[in-house]
Amino acid sequence: MDYQDLNDYELLHYVSENIEEANDIVMNKYYPLVVSIVNKQEKHIDNCGLDRSDLIQEGMVGLSHAIETFSEHEDTVFYTYAKHCIERIIISAIVAAHRKKHKILNESISYDDPIVVNDRLLKDSISDPLNILLSTDNEAKIESKLRAKLTSFETEVFELMIVGCSNKEITEILNIEYKQVDNAIQRIRSKAKGIIKINK
């Protein structure tokens, strides 16, 4: 059979039956999409321990995940689903790399006074949540409670906030409008304030 002539749904059917040739065709077909997404995100990896090849590798992992988990019964086309999976894993890799980069700095900051911690979290500074929530056991508990209240979109914004990304950088990384980021940050702060009040 010439798998080259099959559409995505047919190819994915054969992939589910462990036909390696079908899997290779899908991977090769969507490799340019991975490269395109990497091109958009490459500017966010300066001095964080990642390079272009790392992002491409992460993107291919995301594509492989999309191939394995996509169901044609979902209300979306494979291209859209694959793009989402690739973007999410690349963004996660960038966030993780920036977190690692800032770890020494974060661990060197002391927040022994809970009043100071709470005051810092309530400030309107994007970088404050990182210093506060990740510094001590108490703040780790607060962070855990906060994360449980965040939507998936708010979690993505929060992850980028705590590695020091500006609102503008978040809009570029997530490819969304500035107002969406600003609104998400306000909701995150509001939820954080509520948790702090409960834990006082």
Image (cartoon, helix red, strand yellow):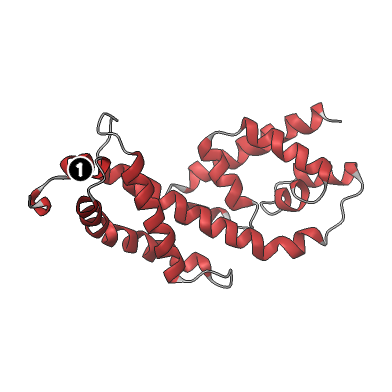
- Spot occupied by residue 147 in the image (x, y as percentages of width and height): 64, 37
- Say left or right for 52 vs 181: left
Front-lying residue, 172 or 163:
163
Work out which residue is located at the far right of the displayed protein and give it: 113
- Say left or right for 75 vs 58: left
Front-lying residue, 113 or 18:
18
Circle 1 Cα neighbour tier, 10 Å, few/some/many (<14 / 14–19 / ≥20): some
Residue at point 91% right, 49% down?
112
Residue denoted by label 1: 14
- Spot occupied by residue 135 in the image (x, y as percentages of width and height): 79, 51
Q: Quadrant of the C terminus?
A: top right
Q: Is residue 35 above or below residue 137?
A: below
Instruction: Report the number of discs.
Output: 1
- Say left or right for 185 vs 168: right
Residue at point 74% right, 29% down?
194
- Say left or right for 170 vs 62: right
Residue type at mark 1? Answer: Tyr
- Spot occupied by residue 18 in the image (x, y as percentages of width and height): 26, 45
